Amino acid sequence: MTINILRTQDGKTYQEEFSLGHSKVTTLLSALYEIKSKLDPTLTFGSGCRSGICGSCAVLVDGKETLACSHKPSADELIEPLRYHPVIRDLKVDKSKAHATLSILKSVDLSPDPKKIDEQKTKIQTDCILCDSCYSACPVLAVNSDFLGPFTLTRVYRYEAIQSSNLLESIQTNGIWDCTLCGECTIACPQGIDSKMDITMLRSLSAQAGHSDPNFGAMGTMEAMDFGTPDFGDGGFGF
């Protein structure tokens, strides 16, 4: 089996091919460990629980976000680090900027009257493991690095839905209206969380609270502008 890895070391990015021969590795993560132990001890990647719970081993496999500990490798796959994250070394990325978007949750009272909470409403959202797969899959971050990202907006919906957390104001800019609703985040999530639907629900809650898509306002301004009446001249067909 041959595995190709996009590596970044000493400021250089390059693709390297590793042959595992007839080794019977069961997961991509075990293949990475075998490469590190037998072929190149400098190979760097994230790892933790090895059972799909911690999210540390998320990488791109042929362009798709995948947990290395859950993926059965095939020949000639290209393994890359997650998108929109600074690469520390090889497949290991810095998630601090992405996770910093969760700071908007600091104002949430996480200990309200339990009688007022129906956690079943957002039970699936609590399964987020912060693997950043949805963040890596989001095309909005290619053009707006300040976008809050799917996992943060999902967490906002979780709190807003069960206890009215007063976070709606903080997601109007670089948040729910910037999302294209493409659904790539939902496809990428290994936990089956539908961030696209969560964002759609947040838009509905925002509209109920009096917020609106600022892009509509900009469009309305353009429609109201007077661009003048075209002059068709003598013999024209102006009405």
Image (tube, helix red, strand yellow):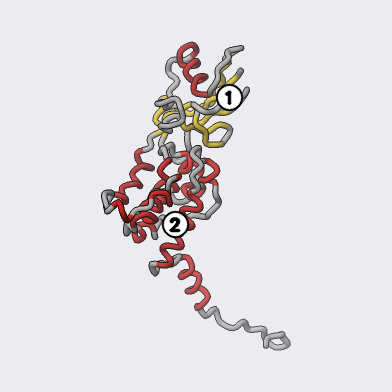
3D distance between C-alphas at marks 2 and 1: 36 Å
- Helix, strand or loop at label 2? It is loop
- Quarter of the image for the C terminus: give it: bottom right
**Quick one: label 2, few (<14), some, or many (20+) residues within 10 Å?**
many
Q: Amino acid at mark 2?
A: Ile
- The percent position of residue 159, horizontal first and vertical second, equals 36, 52
Residue at position x 39%, y 51% in the image: 158
Residue at position x 56%, y 82% in the image: 228
Nearest to N terminus: mark 2 or mark 1? 1
The quadrant in which residue 71 appears is: top right
Asked whether, in this view, residue 23 is left or right of residue 57, the answer is right
Q: Which residue is mark 1?
A: 73
- The percent position of residue 212, horizontal first and vertical second, equals 43, 67
- The percent position of residue 155, horizontal first and vertical second, equals 39, 48
Residue at position x 59%, y 83% in the image: 229
Q: Which residue is mark 2?
A: 176
Q: Amino acid at mark 1?
A: Pro
**Quick one: label 1, few (<14), some, or many (20+) residues within 10 Å?**
many
Asked whether, in this view, residue 234 is left or right of residue 66, the answer is right
**Front one among 96 and 17:** 96
The quadrant in which residue 206 appears is: bottom left
- The percent position of residue 175, horizontal first and vertical second, equals 42, 55
**Front one among 205 and 61:** 205
Q: Note whether 236 is above or below 207 in the view shown.
A: below
Q: Note whether 161 is above or below 232 in the view shown.
A: above
Q: Note whether 14 is above or below 116 in the view shown.
A: above
